Image (tube, coloured by chain):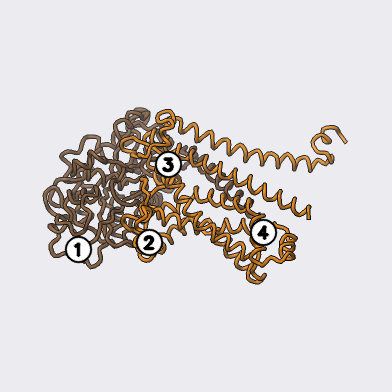
Chain colours: A brown, B orange
Amino acid sequence: MFSKTITRANLSLVLAGIIAFGLNACGGNSGTGGEVRIQGAGATFPNPLYQKWVSEYGKQHPNVKIDYQSVGSGAGIKQIKERTVDFGASDSPMKDEDLKAAPGEILHIPTVLGAVVLTYNLSGVSQPLRFAPDVVADIYLGKIKNWTDPRLKADNSGVNFPNADITVVYRSDGSGTSAVFTDYLSKVSPEWKGKVGTGTSPKWPEGIGAKGNEGVTGQVKQTPNTIGYVELAYAVQNKLPAALIKNRAGSFVEPTIDAVTSAAAGSLANTPEDLRVSITDAAGAAAYPISSYTYILAYKAQPDQLKGKTLVDFLWWGIHDGEKFAKELQYAPLPEEIVKRAEAKINSMTAGGQALR
Amino acid sequence: MSDWRRRLSPTGNTGDAIFRAAMFAVALLMLLIVVAMILALASHSTLSIRQFGFGFLTNREWDPIKGQFGALAFIYGTIVSSLIALIISVPLSLGIAIFLVEQAPYFLSRPITFLVELLAAIPSVVYGLWGIFVLAPFLRVYVEPPLARWFGWLPLFQGPITGIGLLTGGIILAIMVTPIISAVVRDVLSAVPNTQREAALALGATKWETTLVVLVNAAPGIAGAVILGLGRAIGETMAVTMVIGNRPEISLSLFQPSYTLASVIANEFTEATADIYLSSLVELGLILFFVTFVVNAIARLLVWRVTRRTTGVGLAV
């Protein structure tokens, strides 16, 4: 009797899976009538902001329906390449080979900035810890194993470290947060670059994996003597201890929204024309070194005049009016100069050869 | 009555004929879904099957950045965590079932049965949260240090203690499969005819010896229940990924983090962009599907054997 119920439950799960799969595969076409429907998908990191944008923009333009699904950066890139969505979203810029494989030229429009924060659980330590880049790398490489390591003590005079092994926690789910963090480690540590590299799911040399920001936080909070990394917004909202990181200019910088915007401003000189840039380990005395842009991805040549126009207007609104929602949701707004360069990108979008703005 | 009607339904009723056709269509749909799933998994994993061949099963490296993909660490983690789950849950489930069928008074057996089946209905993410916040710290403080102290000479209990790892994953699984195994075993024990118990008692057997007789008769069915639980343990995703440590490494120590097939698919699928990466993840799904399929088939076979045998005994008496 009971075995039957189990099989039935299994089958309904299978069914649900197939239906979900089917729904995922289709979708993406516009509505009819006076209503314009735009569909986007991608990064989970900016999702709270994009949902805010969608609802605020929808209030001002009742005929526009924008739908953003936070399916992950990887899926966002895949869907924009396959043209199943009107815009994609990704935390890390698309790779050259992905851009080449796309059926048209894809633009990167930066929307806001985020950062990765190192958090830890050390009883009896009240002042924020300070980490030099090589120390962070060597902890995650498993070379610094104990909290009493002299290199840790050197930057944290007055901190009473426990004589305990360091338990390293990383994100087990593929994530832009991991990509930004490993990008930073690859820049500051040649050994990391050679051994591990940069990616959403690297092969971690050390530690235990937890799912999502909430998983890492749970693990760090529950286990003494741990260190983990989470998004800035998540760390602020949950009042987690956050370490100061030594930047390229040699100052220890607290992860704040302004320090993240500074990192973008400090990277202007080496920001290329297409705006695909990593701003980890940025120049500037106030720059927080583990920062990154998040992008909306859209085709330069829009296939549909009406939808193209709507998308362009929405993006324009986003990088101007939308930016003011960034801070309250713990995202760093774009620096002025980058807003100007993003404007140029949006202005270059066309439909049927005609400019949309 | 016209001829086609009679052909469709022996009783010649149109309603019956339509009903029968509809039910057949529904049953056929299930079959089609299973076939479609296998085909989809196989076709989406052709890339990695071609590139890695059988080496995929024996390679323990999983490095998406360098494009190296092997399933061995995940297969190991899946099997070992499921085995730990069975080692803990089988004696527990047998005890519960024996108590419910052979010993508990009616007023106790009903509520306990209800509670055990309620456990089966708790969503796995809830088990996972409980695992992170209650079980892992408990194991780290009260269970793993004594294990390391007294049994540390065994390679099973060595290395740093974090409360996260194969052991924790296995224990979570054990708690999750116990309701399933005990419920099926209870059904199997109830199916053993009372005449057997009466015969054993009449021959002067004690209560314990009588229970033994019942157990021996129900053995294939109990095996079926165990394998059904194993199937559940192999496929479990959320709860395990929250406590197992998600590290594709093969270590003898149960304190060390590990990884399962289902967990890695859930963790990495959304952010996988490279074709070979996606294909390898799908191939992991194919392996998982195959393992679960075989396990369920064996369970069916065993349950079928026990039901046939007990009716046989009943008739003989």
**In contact (CB < 8 Å): disc 1 and disc 2:** no
One can see residue B225 in this view: yes
Residue to which mark 2 is pinned: B147
Q: Residue A266 occupies which quadrant of the picture?
A: top left
Q: Residues within 10 Å of mark 1 (few under 14, many from 20)?
A: some
- Provide the secondary structure element on which disc 1 rests: loop
Which residue is nearer to you in this view: A172 or A25?
A172
Judge whether B98 appears above or below B12 on screen.
below
Chain letter of disc 4 in the image:
B
Q: Are marks 1 and 3 in contact (CB under 8 Å)?
A: no
Residue B187 spot, x, y in % from top left: 65, 57
Report the mark closest to the observer, 3 or 2: 2
Of discs 1 and 3, which sits in the foreground?
A: 1
Q: CA distance from mark 1 to mark 3?
A: 51 Å
> Residue B221's spot in the image, x, y percent?
63, 52
Q: Which residue is mark 3?
A: A39
Q: Position of residue B288 (x, y in %)?
A: 49, 42
Disc 2 secondary structure class: helix
Q: Residues within 10 Å of mark 2 (few under 14, many from 20)?
A: some
Q: How many marks?
A: 4
Q: Chain of mark 3?
A: A
- Amino acid at dot 3: Gln
**Disc 4: which residue:** B214
In this rendering, the answer to whether B120 lies above or below A334 is below
Residue corresponding to mark 1: A161
- The chain letter for the residue carrying disc 2 is B
Marks 4/2: CA–CA distance: 36 Å
